[in-house]
Image (spheres, rainbow, N blue to C red):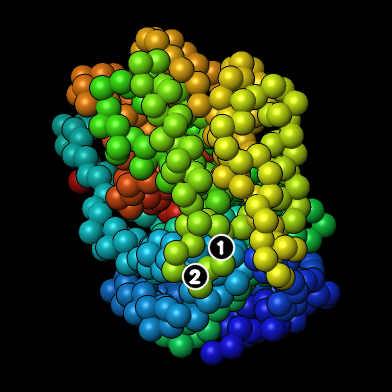
Amino acid sequence: MPLQKDILNFINGEFVAGSKWFENRTPTTNAVIGRVAEAGKAEVDAAVNAARAALKGPWGSMTLAKRVELLEALVAEITNRFDEFLEAECADTGKPRSLASHIDIPRGAANFKVFADVVKNVPTEFFDMATPDGKSAINYGYRTPVGVVGVICPWNLPLLLMTWKVGPALACGNTVVVKPSEETPRTAALLGEVMNKVGIPKGVYNVVHGFGPDSAGEFLTTHPKVDALTFTGETRTGEIIMKAAATGSRPVSLEMGGKNAAIVFEDCDFDAAIEGTLRSAFVNCGQVCLGTERVYVQRPIFDKFVAAMKAGAEALKIGVPEDKDTGMGPLISKEHQNKVLSYYKIAKDAGATIVTGGGVPDMPGDLKDGCWVQPTIWTGLPEDARVIKEEIFGPCCHIAPFDTEEEVLEKANANEYGLATAIWTTNLSRAHCVAQKMEVGIAWVNSWFLRDLRTPFGGSKQSGIGREGGVHSLEFYTELKNVCIKL
Ligand code: NAD
């Protein structure tokens, strides 16, 4: 199947144009490869109304067993069309096929299965109580869908992070209006075709394309008939969405930015720590919210660690998605490339030692115009340097030495974000103590990005509000009511 040229909104089971069009570019060359229908107020309104109608219609009255069957059919159909999803995702993001084919697409599909299993198997609570008249009453929890959920998505793992929200939302019986990132509209639209093919009723899954302010993002998040908002993206955008949700007292789930620290103790398995830290700094061209941009290494192994990181970064092959040797693709856009390069300059101006990288790689032919940057490592900056404090979201990290556990905990926690950490040590007791004291939502020990989708996922501090994953998703995607019966 050739890539679609026109990417349309998906409203009430149909593909429709919008009020305007905007360009769809591919980051490897920055060439225009299609156009996207931008949803105006009218299209967003139609999508929300379709979602409300579907709640009252066949979706609302469907048995759980049938809903689960449809979600499982979705997984099968995404898997059937694996290559199309893969091509669409790689065209939008420029990421290596080797990455998207083992993370983005399979996990994007698996999200429907995981949450179908959760809703099938999770019971609610029950309490028996004595009443003052010597008799008794029973209480049980009963979950109902929260309603129409607005789903606002980022561009770094487009399908995976979208279905991470749409999966539990649908499993719990809600309907959704999805606003994919303007940079990556393709797989959300393709999923519309899959919804129709497997027989998900019209209006259950809707997609509106566009930007944030004065576009589909704002129209959706301020729409009074949207019952709840779930968002993944930058912290500043999350704050705007939280303000929008305040009108009508609507629940929000926010998965936001990070400035994650890796802590490497001298007693670590050195090779595993290098492999994990290289991956966490450079995979997906550093555009992973859980990625590492600050590395703290215990002094006795500091020089050896920096040298091994340098060698690993320089061995990464920068290239196009279809080349199977590609270890790192481009950034998502020219705008983001400019942002990351501005931080490379900030680091240099602040007097960082540039261990490797710091610029744009020399690419051949058409690729010259793409959004490439070099993987970059710095040392020697003070803890208050901007590249140590602020999220860059590029393939870069600063490595600093430390001496004691207390010192590193203080440094690692001295940040406004609190999403994730990776701790590398073979000392079991220390691993637990440091993991428990880190102010983050997710602490990995001797690993990174190892995800069991049944576990809670989310950030502390300015990295997020709420937890999704497994049963925790039910807290957001359902209304839990207590039924009390006097016997
Ligand atoms: P972004 O905040 O720029 O955009 C995210 C989405 O919000 C897009 O769909 C965008 O169009 C929309 N949007 C922007 N302004 C809006 C507004 N005023 N009203 C409504 N919608 C609006 O984020 P991004 O650049 O797409 O993604 C990168 C960011 O996402 C990074 O900060 C990264 O850390 C974060 N992220 C977090 C997680 C997590 O799980 N915590 C996961 C992935 C990415």
The reply to whether the residue tagged 1 has its Cβ within 8 angstroms of ligand 1 is: no
**Residue 354, horizontal then vertical, whole percent:** 61, 31
Q: Is residue 338 above or below residue 354?
A: below
Q: Which residue in the protein does label 2 denote?
A: 323
Q: Is residue 245 above or below residue 180?
A: above
Res 430 quadrant in image:
top left
Q: Is residue 297 visible?
A: no
Q: How many marks?
A: 2
**Residue 399, horizontal then vertical, whole percent:** 50, 26
Q: Nearer the viewer, residue 412 or 68?
A: 412
Q: CA distance from mark 1 to mark 2?
A: 7 Å
Res 137 quadrant in image:
top left
| Residue at the spot 37% in from the left edge and 37% down from the top edge | 274
| Residue at the spot 68% in from the left edge and 49% down from the top edge | 360
| Residue at the spot 75% in from the left edge and 81% down from the top edge | 17
The amino acid type of the residue labelled 1 equals Gly
| Residue at the spot 30% in from the left edge and 50% down from the top edge | 452
